[in-house]
Image (cartoon, rainbow, N blue to C red):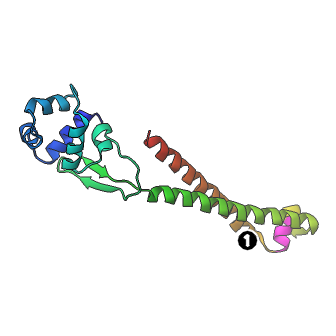
Amino acid sequence: MAFGETLTSLRKAKGLSQEQLAETLNIARQTISKWELNQSTPDMNYIAQLSEFFNVSTDYLIKGEHKEENSVLKTETLPSGNIIQTGNTSSDKVAYKWCFLLGVISITISFGGIIAFGICSVLHPWGVMIDDMYFEGLAGFLLGTKSLLFFAILVITLLAGISLAAYGIIKQIKRTEGRK
């Protein structure tokens, strides 16, 4: 969103005319009009005043986007139906890192368990006959030791860990791209 659109949206949300906003800033109404039409831009002094007056960050005012900081993201719905977010979350960043970390831990533990089953099936081979079908190797070991359910839980945990780690990575990438 361009500066002019953001300013127009904020001004209308407060129910102000261009004239009223101009009086607040002690400038001409035409100056507000030029800013809203993107024909000119205010200097930093007015950006700071507008930011404070509308209670939004200067990033939001200038770029129409929100700067990530170590505060909680606040969402405010304006009477015009527009949504303004001020502040930000570092809690999202922490949550995505935890997703990734928990995913890696799940992957490590479950993969280790699966490898252990594979090694055990080689060191202690089993052969199992079920309904005229003979199973040997890993399948024979799992069926013979009645550990197929535990093995299935390890596989599900591995897949969940991969999903969790991928989610954390993807969200972190999207969050980083959103700041550009």
- Is 94 on the left or on the right of 135, as rendered? left
Label 1: element kind = helix
Numbered range of the magenta stretch? 140-145
Residue 129, image x, y percentages: 88, 68
Residue found at the far bottom of this picture: 146
Snapshot quadrant of residue 161: bottom right
State the predominant SS element of the stretch in magenta.
helix
The quadrant of the rendering that contains the N terminus is top left
Q: Is residue 4 above or below residue 166?
A: above
Front-most of 21 and 162? Answer: 21
Q: Amino acid at mark 1?
A: Phe
Residue at the image point whose x is 10% and y is 35% from the top = 27
Front-most of 7 and 69? Answer: 69
Residue at the image point whose x is 87% and y is 64% from the top = 119
Q: Which residue is mark 1?
A: 150
Residue 53, image x, y percentages: 18, 48
Front-most of 96 and 49? Answer: 49
Front-most of 121 and 165? Answer: 165
Residue 89, image x, y percentages: 41, 56
The answer to whether residue 81 is visible is no
Please say whether residue 14 is one of the residues in the magenta stretch. no
- Is 180 on the left or on the right of 66, as rendered? right
Residue 170, image x, y percentages: 54, 48
The answer to whether residue 35 is visible is yes
Q: Is residue 133 above or below residue 176?
A: below
- Is 24 on the left or on the right of 112, as rendered? left
Residue at the image point whose x is 15% and y is 43% from the top = 11
